[in-house]
């Protein structure tokens, strides 16, 4: 399943590259999954109720099950006295039948005895065990949860495509479903390349840096709903990269690399994958994140997205291109993170012909949504990236913005 080639005579637009990725990917096939494993995934079936909820008439209060006519006149001045002929607790299998002129002590959730039609809360009584004094009358049927009043057998509980959150999983469990058909979380393998990289916690030479990208991108993949596998550092040796990639394909639904995709002599990712002929490399009209690659590798045509190595470029590229890919494979709509409008706190400039993604702080107060750029434009400034919670998206044809202008903002770290 080779990808459509990226244009070589001009820069692709951001939207073109996103659509190229989305058009080439398909959602992963669904299968029955345990309820908790399906949290956050779209259900891939219409789920109908196999039973009524509640499945039997039960008490909504601790109190006394009664015939309404026996207690209709009860008041503080004229209490009603009834003999207590039994007790019903939740989970009790023995069913009782109630005769007129008697009552049964009942606990919340317990089956209402046959013949009873109302429940008197214990607070309206003296709490008697053998006999009870009732000083207030319920309305007929009060404090009884009737069979099927919530859900009827055959009702559609969840429609195909519904996102399975805690409330939906609780509903499925309440009707006895232990599994549900859902698409699996994509298994995303994250690979960082570069002979200069070192593992955090180890010694650092004068010409080396710690590998931040693989941790950042693996965390981002997990936040997007995927299962992330972080691979150890891969050097700039072509054979080492080729072997490492081949080893990882067995557990990958998607591979994401960072680094090695520019025009340098040691850009190993581009060198190795270009020879395969199934991965296209090109430049996207964006800042940061200009060099990009996409295609398929291995016998199973595993999709691969190759991102630039500078941390900010890598992270922005992940948000713009990889997050939609993950959501496409999960079948979660929308694929792209929605933009919101906000007032710009300070002016900024942008290169013509490129869509710029500016690190920023987004907030909402009594005056509405506002956003403030954070730090400089450098694609190595991870301190500024950490301080940002949003990206201002500046269109290709806009070269400057003034304080108070309305801008489009991609808000990070929240579900959509």
Image (spheres, helix red, strand yellow):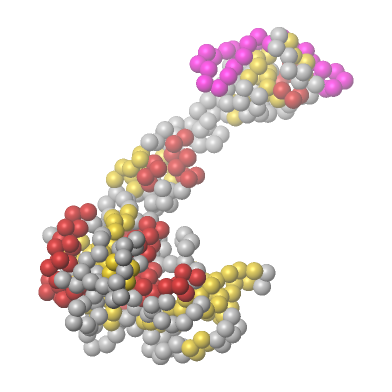
Residue 110, placed above or below residue 158? above
Does 93 appear in magenta? yes
Residue 332, placed above or below residue 376? above
**Along the viewing direction, whichever of 332 and 74 lies nearer the viewer:** 332
Residue 297, placed above or below residue 5? above
**Along the viewing direction, whichever of 196 and 298 lies nearer the viewer:** 196
Horizontally, residue 232 falls left or right of residue 318, namely left
Q: What residue occupies the far right of the structure in this picture? A: 77
Residue 126 percent location from the top left of the image: 77, 18
Horizontally, residue 80 falls left or right of residue 42, namely right
Horizontally, residue 137 falls left or right of residue 32, namely right
Q: Residue at x 38, y 85 (%)?
A: 354
Residue 348 percent location from the top left of the image: 51, 86
Examine the image and state in which quarter residue 207 appears.
bottom left
Q: Residue at x 47, y 40 (%)?
A: 170
Quadrant for the N terminus, please: bottom left
Examine the image and state in which quarter residue 276 appears.
bottom left
Residue 12 percent location from the top left of the image: 30, 82
Residue 308 seen anywhere in this rendered image of the structure: no
Examine the image and state in which quarter residue 37 appears.
top left
Q: How many marks?
A: 0
- Magenta region, residue range: 73-102
Q: Residue at x 72, y 28 (%)?
A: 139
What predominant SS class does the magenta segment belong to? Answer: loop
Does 406 appear in magenta? no
């Amino acid at each position: 399943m080779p990808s459509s080639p990226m244009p070589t005579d001009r820069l692709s637009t951001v939207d073109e590259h996103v659509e190229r990725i989305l058009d080439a990917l398909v959602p992963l096939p669904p299968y029955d999954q345990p309820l908790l494993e399906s949290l956050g995934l779209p259900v891939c079936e219409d789920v109908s109720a196999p039973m009524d909820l509640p499945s039997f008439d039960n008490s909504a209060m601790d109190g006394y099950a009664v015939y309404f006519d026996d207690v209709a006149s009860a008041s503080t001045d004229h209490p009603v006295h009834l003999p207590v002929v039994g007790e019903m607790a939740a989970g009790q299998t023995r069913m009782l039948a109630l005769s007129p002129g008697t009552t049964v002590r009942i606990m919340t959730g317990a089956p209402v005895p046959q013949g009873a039609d109302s429940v008197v809360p214990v607070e309206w009584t003296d709490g008697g065990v053998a006999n009870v004094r009732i000083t207030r009358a319920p309305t007929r049927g009060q404090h009884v949860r009737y069979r099927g009043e919530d859900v009827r057998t055959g009702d559609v509980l969840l429609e195909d495509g519904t996102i399975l959150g805690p409330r939906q999983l609780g509903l499925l469990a309440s009707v006895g479903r232990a599994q549900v058909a859902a698409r699996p979380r994509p298994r995303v393998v994250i690979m960082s390349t570069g002979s200069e990289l070192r593992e955090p916690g180890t010694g650092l030479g004068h010409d080396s840096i710690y590998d931040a990208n693989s941790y950042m991108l693996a965390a981002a993949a997990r936040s997007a709903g995927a299962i992330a596998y972080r691979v150890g550092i891969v050097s700039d040796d072509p054979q080492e990269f080729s072997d490492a990639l081949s080893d990882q394909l067995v557990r990958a639904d998607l591979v994401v690399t960072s680094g090695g995709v520019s025009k340098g002599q040691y850009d190993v990712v581009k060198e190795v994958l270009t020879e395969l002929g199934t991965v296209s490399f090109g430049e996207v009209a964006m800042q940061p994140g200009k060099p990009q690659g996409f295609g398929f590798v291995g016998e199973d045509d595993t999709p691969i997205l190759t991102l630039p190595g500078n941390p900010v470029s890598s992270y922005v590229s992940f948000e713009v291109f990889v997050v939609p890919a993950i959501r496409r494979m999960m079948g979660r709509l929308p694929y792209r993170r929605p933009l919101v409008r906000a007032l710009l706190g300070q002016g900024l400039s942008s290169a013509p012909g490129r869509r710029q993604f500016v690190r920023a702080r987004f907030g909402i107060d009594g005056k509405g949504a506002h956003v403030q750029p954070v730090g400089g434009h450098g694609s190595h400034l991870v301190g500024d990236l950490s301080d940002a919670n949003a990206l201002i998206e500046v269109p290709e044809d806009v070269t400057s913005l003034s304080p108070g202008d309305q801008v489009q903002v991609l808000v990070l770290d929240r579900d959509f």
